[in-house]
Amino acid sequence: MLLHLPGSEHRMGNLPCFHQINPLVSQDGDLVIGIFLSLFSAEVNSITGADLFASPPNKACKPYQWLHKNYQQALALLFAVEEINRDSHLLPNISLGFHLYNTYHSDERTLESSLRWLSGQDQPIPNYSCRKQDKAVAVIGGVTSALSVQMGTILDLYKFPQISYGPFDAILSDKIQFPSLYQMAPKDTSLHQGVVHLMVYFEWNWIGLVVSDDMRGEKFLWEIRGEMVKKGVCVSFTEKIPVSERTQMESHKTFMPRIMTSSGKVIVVHGDTDSLMILRHSQVPIFQIEKVWIATSHWDITMRPLYSQGFAFHGALTFSYLTREIPGFKTFLKTVTPTKYPHDALLRGFWLSAFRCPNQPEYLEQELCSPNASLDTLPLGSFDMTMSGFSYTIYNTVYAVAWALHEISRRKSEKRSMVNEEYLVPYSWQLHSFLKKTQFTNNAGDQVFVDERRRSEAQYAIMNYVFFPNETDALVKVGQFVPKAQFGQDFTIWEDAIVWGWWGSKVPSAVCSESCLPGFRKSPLEGQPNCCFDCSPCPEGEISSQKDVEHCTKCPEDEYPNKQREHCLPKVVTFLNVKESLGMTLAFMAVFFSLLTALVLGVFVKFQDTPIVKANNRTLSYTLLISLIFCFLCSLLFIGHPTTTTCLLQQTVFAVVFTMAVSSVLAKTIIVVLAFKGIRPGSRIRMFMDPRMSVYVVLICSGLQVIFCGIWLGTYPPFPEVDTHSQYGHIILKCNEGSAFAFYCVLGYIALLALGSFSVAFLARNLPDTFNEAKFITFSMLVFCSVWITFLPTYQSTKGKAMVAVEIFSILASSAGLLGCIFIPKCYIILLKPDRNTQGQIRNK
């Protein structure tokens, strides 16, 4: 049966300060547990040490705020105690009772409540107890680490076992510092990994962190930052919320605007519900701000001071403990009404507040509104029918104390057959050795260990908070995180089931800089985290096929990037092919001019006895024509797939035949000059008029070129080359000269002979004679030199097939110039003006 401590009803009837009564509820029993829960908050900034131990009637009633959802914890305590007292196998013939106190986030009120429990009266007196010592056996309390330490300071002096149901804190596991403190919550050692896994899954990398300003908050901050660095996630801001109510009231106007106006769109909140109480009371902006809240296991995001303020957290994701359902708990909750527990003033006060009874002070004599209502009709912001993590831990904690007491009772019963009641009731300090070893299987089938070293890691359900326009809300399971499961099964998320904020149905973007698309790379910004960057196009010849790459990769030699530089394409193998239009045109021109030259040669052979043929040294004319035929034909070596043979022959054949052609022109020019010089009486030049002189000139000049080409082939010969860089997207097959010096020396030697021929012919251009070739040779050498002077810069500036085509065109043009300027006028006379090709015409001249 539930009842208040003596005198409490009287005070309730005279004062509306319901929250100042301690204990709030008590149930007598052979053994009594003290439990400290956070059921409502009050302003504490005006409390001083002077009025700490003043009697409640002398205090002014201060405003307080019900924390409706925490009342489930009180009902979990009541449910567990009733189950234990009904169980004939657990603590038989011994009833278990409790005293329920409210805790506040202040050192003064915590000290006051602890002394009240120890002294057994409302006005605490240190080192004095009005209650029998044998009834009080343990204290369950400490929703936060700070409260556990504050309570432990007093309780440890009397070796009172204190069992914390709050979040597990590794610091409190130090038995030297906290020898009487036990923790029942599962370990949250992998919580930060689950939160970061969620960030990585949704590709969020610009995250705000809000933690409670205590050791647990610092530890979580250190752990999650390290994990975020490993996964490439950056912290946009960090905000520490003070755990003291007094400090919260002083600072909430400054940190909440910073959080809401920050650039981080995803905010991780870590801390227990009471430490982060200020987030519920802070003003929420009237306009919608695109923020995604991620709450960790101990912050109840559904708890809020006003029903309408749930919209600010619509779409939030929260990590809740993944626990089994305690059989009968929901049924028990549905049956809880003030009429079932008429002496429970706490339930009556909760009922009045939760069902929003209008203008009804919390008096016992007052008629209740909705007396036959059920807790399952309350909205989620006021009450949750699903057992919370705190309630589950409280349930297990009560059973842990019961099993420890049961073991003490069993051992004492074994020692004495006749046991009196006084001997069976243990002292509180005797409970320690039994608590450490306590382990049992609860009614949900879970193994429970009081020994922290055997405690399992927590598993989490990922819940999605949905706030509906009609001001109702719900938590929907959208995934889970099981730390010790196999890879791929440890983290599960059902993205389609998630309801995001009011701004849309798409996954919100939470990045410092938008992702760099394929084809770009990240360029870090000086002084900024690595999540903030610019996007730069990949350099020439490099690609990036994925988003947000830091370095582009080069394509293989036989591939090239596409225009977007997203992937590599195979290069087109190219060379001057005779099947192409350019190659076909050049080949046709080479064959055409070679046949034309052969035709001219045939004309000269047919009319070899005519004066115009005989007057210009038939042998040199034949030699020059044959050389020109080979000059035209050698250009065909440059067309087609380059091979070792063609590469060796291209430049060397070209050099030799062109040298022969130019040497023949030079010999012709020399002969013309010598002929006119030698006709003078007594001239010594006549001795050089020997017909073999022209042959010597051609052989000597050509022989020097042959020797030089032989040295070239013997040292650095030309070779086939695969050029992958000269032309974008193409692999050019060409012949490498082997030695650029040798190549230009060959051209220089030909140019030197051509320049000599031009100079000599220019000097002899005005000599009188009908068949004087000097003028024609001058024009031909002018064309020849012009072509090859133009060739050099053009050849250097072109690449690939164009380079080869330029050389072929230069060969054809210079050869055609020699043919056209020297022989076409003669053929015109031979074929069309035969009357001018006679001895009489020569005499007339």
Image (cartoon, rainbow, N blue to C red):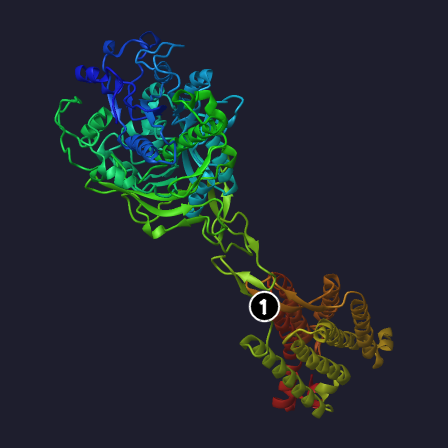
**In the image, residue 762 lies at what x, y percent?**
70, 69
Residue in the image at 56% along x and 54% along y? 553
View extreme (top): residue: 50
Residue in the image at 27% along x and 39% along y? 385
Mark 1 — residue? 802
**In the image, residue 160 lies at what x, y percent?**
44, 20
163 and 571: which one is in front? 163
256 and 588: which one is in front? 256
Q: Quadrant location of the N terminus?
A: top left
**In the image, residue 210 lies at what x, y percent?**
40, 31
Disc 1 residue type (three-letter): Ala
Task: Confirm whether residue 806 shows in the render.
Answer: yes
Horizontally, is 191 left or right of 678 in the view? left
Q: Quadrant of residue 404?
A: top left
Q: Residues within 10 Å of mark 1 (few under 14, many from 20)?
A: some
Task: Confirm whether residue 679 shows in the render.
Answer: no
Residue 136 position (above or below residue 735): above
Residue 107 position (above or below residue 537): above
Which type of secondary structure does the marked residue at label 1 adopt? Answer: helix
**In the image, residue 770 lies at what x, y percent?**
69, 82
324 and 603: which one is in front? 324
Q: Quadrant of residue 323?
A: top left
